[in-house]
Amino acid sequence: MRTWARAELLRPALEALLASTDAAARVRGDPVELPHRYSDPRDVEVTALLCAALAYGRVDLFKPRLSRLLETLGPSPASVARDSTAAQLVRRLEGFRTG
């Protein structure tokens, strides 16, 4: 069976699950919300990687720290990641800790 055909078999169940779930509320409570602040796909990718790498354990503790990290990186985390040297990134993030 082709992949798309299998996906179509799942569609009704997935749509019913989505309809019965307040997806927006679930996203608001999770660090996955943070990459949605950006419109540039490169910024979304960088912030999603940071959130995935650093958000473990209690979301209520990590989400505020991740928000501060992203504020430190400014309006375009992808540009900062692309244009900064390792030493510049270390200086910029001095004092950041996850625990």
Image: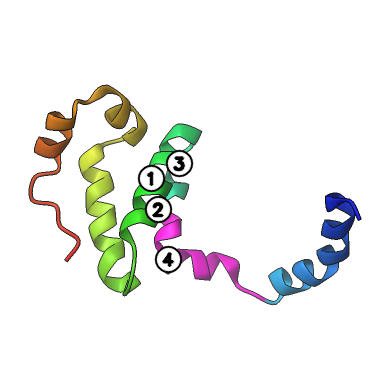
Left/right placement of residue 97 relative to residue 51 reads left
Q: Earlier in the sequence, mark 3 or mark 2?
A: 2
Left/right placement of residue 60 relative to residue 8 reads left
The three-letter amino acid code for the residue at tag 1 is Thr
Q: Is residue 88 visible?
A: yes
Crowd band around label 3 with a 10 angstrom C-alpha radius: few (<14), some (14–19), many (20+): some
Left/right placement of residue 52 relative to residue 90 reads right
Q: Residue at x 70, y 77 (%)?
A: 20
The three-letter amino acid code for the residue at tag 4 is Asp
Where is mark 2, residue-wise? 34
Q: Looking at the image, do the residues carrying marks 3 and 1 touch, with CB atoms under 8 Å apart?
A: yes
| Majority secondary structure in the magenta region | helix
Front-lying residue, 37 or 5: 5
Marking on residue 44: 3
Question: Separation of disc 3 and disc 4 at Cα?
Answer: 15 Å
Q: Is residue 61 magenta?
A: no
Where is mark 1, residue-wise? 47
Magenta stretch, residue numbers: 21-33
Q: Looking at the image, do the residues carrying marks 3 and 2 touch, with CB atoms under 8 Å apart?
A: no
Where is mark 4, residue-wise? 30
Q: Looking at the image, do the residues carrying marks 3 and 4 touch, with CB atoms under 8 Å apart?
A: no
Q: Looking at the image, do the residues carrying marks 1 and 4 touch, with CB atoms under 8 Å apart?
A: no
Front-lying residue, 27 or 42: 42
Q: Is residue 90 above or below residue 99?
A: above
Crowd band around label 1 with a 10 angstrom C-alpha radius: few (<14), some (14–19), many (20+): many
Q: Residue at x 60, y 72 (%)?
A: 22
Residue 84 position within the rendered picture, expressed as x and y whole percent measured from the top left: 22, 26
The three-letter amino acid code for the residue at tag 2 is Leu
Q: Residue at x 14, y 30 (%)?
A: 88
Q: Earlier in the sequence, mark 3 or mark 4?
A: 4
